[in-house]
Amino acid sequence: MERKVRVRFAPSPTGPLHIGGIRTALYNYLFARRHGGSMILRIEDTDSRRFVPGAEEYINESLAWLGIGIDEGVREGGEYGPYKQSERRDIYRRYVKQLLDSDKAYIAFDTPEELEAARAATPNFQYDASTRGNMRNSLTMPAEEVKRLIDEGTQYVVRFKIDPDREVKVNDLIRGEVTVNSNILDDKVLYKSADDLPTYHLANIVDDHLMEVSHVIRGEEWLPSAPLHVLLYEAFGWSDTMPEFVHLPLLLKPVGNGKLSKRDGDKLGFPVFPLEWHDPKSGDISSGYREQGYLPEAVVNFLALLGWNPGDDSEVMSMQELIDKFSFEHCSKAGAKFDFKKGIWFNHEYLMKKDDNELADLFMPVLEEKGIAGFSKEYVAKALGMVKGRANLIPDLWDQADFFFVAPETYAEKDVRKRWSAETPAIMEELIAVLETIDDMTSANAEKIVLDWIESKGYHLGNVMNAFRLAVVGACRGPHMFDITELMPREEVVGRIRKAVERIPVPEK
């Protein structure tokens, strides 16, 4: 019987979730949904020294914002819980004991100073079959002394006992078969008595097995750990239920070589975190995609194509389209350059597709921040619908639509010099009279009446219309002039023209 697809995203709550982690979560989600499987969120908080308050909440909020649905987890519950490793101590103890009883692991009492001395004495020191016989552990010490030290509360660790010179094969769905000799592996620490918690390596294997994880999809940086995990599955007798491994390509710097870092984002002006992060220790604030005005669906689309392609020319794809097309056959082995400019392009495309009413909801916080109130959602939606083609991010909409909400206090000097002449004030007074006679201010009707008036008076069309725009907008920019005047109340339009006539100085002849 074919195994049910069950994947897990297992971040550590040690700070904000990096955008590379988000891509890993996304690929897990796409694969699970593609195959009708389940997505697990497991919090790997075994390193108590690195725990950061608020990080777990940040992880959950980030995934929720991006629409990466979780089927089982700390918040959702599930029959395989608890889903937080610090709450699974009793489970891990049993498996530590199993490894010790089967001579697959051993207890080590080496102090940090003793380990440092060993490293100083032996170049490239590795705690393994060639060196463990010279160290303080249960393989070199009498059983009575081991028991006495434990009873006295002496701190110890449990190390995995790796047999030397074994060829360990890892089957990876992207990279194929990878073979590693066990001589390059050290006897990893699996458990620390100091905090009664396992390390990543043991907890990871035990949890994946007990939660019936079918595929382990994670970043390339974990590839060196895969041979150790294969050996641990063998040590427990779980080879038949070993998950499929998938190691994703790295996210690389936009320019130069190396892995994408926060420094790259700070230098080039793009976020590397999904949401804004407030560091509880330093007080530093790191920017996030949400707060910079990106749409979650655009971020998802952008990230999906960093290291994967749909096998055709598709670029703009909904979450469901990504699910329908997703396959590891189209994942790259090589790292993917983080083209943040492409991310901006995606956001522009999604802004263009976004329903104007939804856009208005997203824009309301911008108006609140500016201290602007009193405009209906319908008005805001129509205004944004006219300018969204000129915007890339949500905050850009203000730069394009500000005049719909605030009358200009100043006028672009370049446009004044070019578009405002000695005759303009009188012509603008005439325009006011024309506008006040129009019963139907819809764009097409108002445009016909005003253009007919300009023609009948023999005025220069460009001069009149540009002065009209300058008076209402404050600069020669914006959408079609009569679309603006259809939305803006007539008294507001007339008032702005009068104000411009009063304020813009008439150039000397």
Image (tube, rainbow, N blue to C red):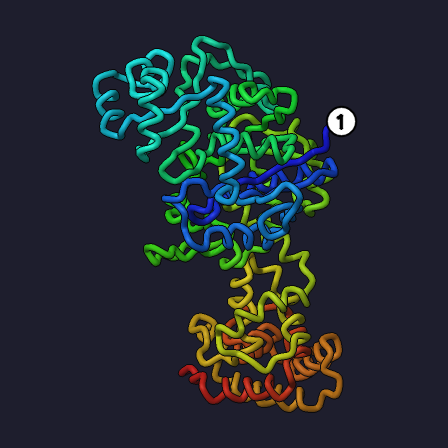
The image shows residue 272, relative to residue 430, as above or below, that is above
Circle 1 packing at 10 Å, graded few (<14), some (14-19), many (20+), is few
The outermost residue toward the top is: 165
13 is higher (above) or lower (below) than 185: below
Q: Which of 219 and 103 is in front in this view?
A: 103
Residue at numbered disc 1: 2
Q: Is residue 243 above or below residue 297?
A: above
Q: Is residue 482 visible?
A: no
Residue at the spot 55% in from the left edge and 68% down from the top edge:
477
Above or below for 392 versus 141: below
Residue 458 visible within the image: yes
Give percent across and percent down for residue 464: 58, 78
The x and y percentages for residue 116 are 24, 26
The quadrant of the image that shows the N terminus is top right
Residue 326: quarter of image: top right
Q: Report which quarter residue 329 is drawn in.
A: top right
Residue 67 located left or right of residue 195:
right
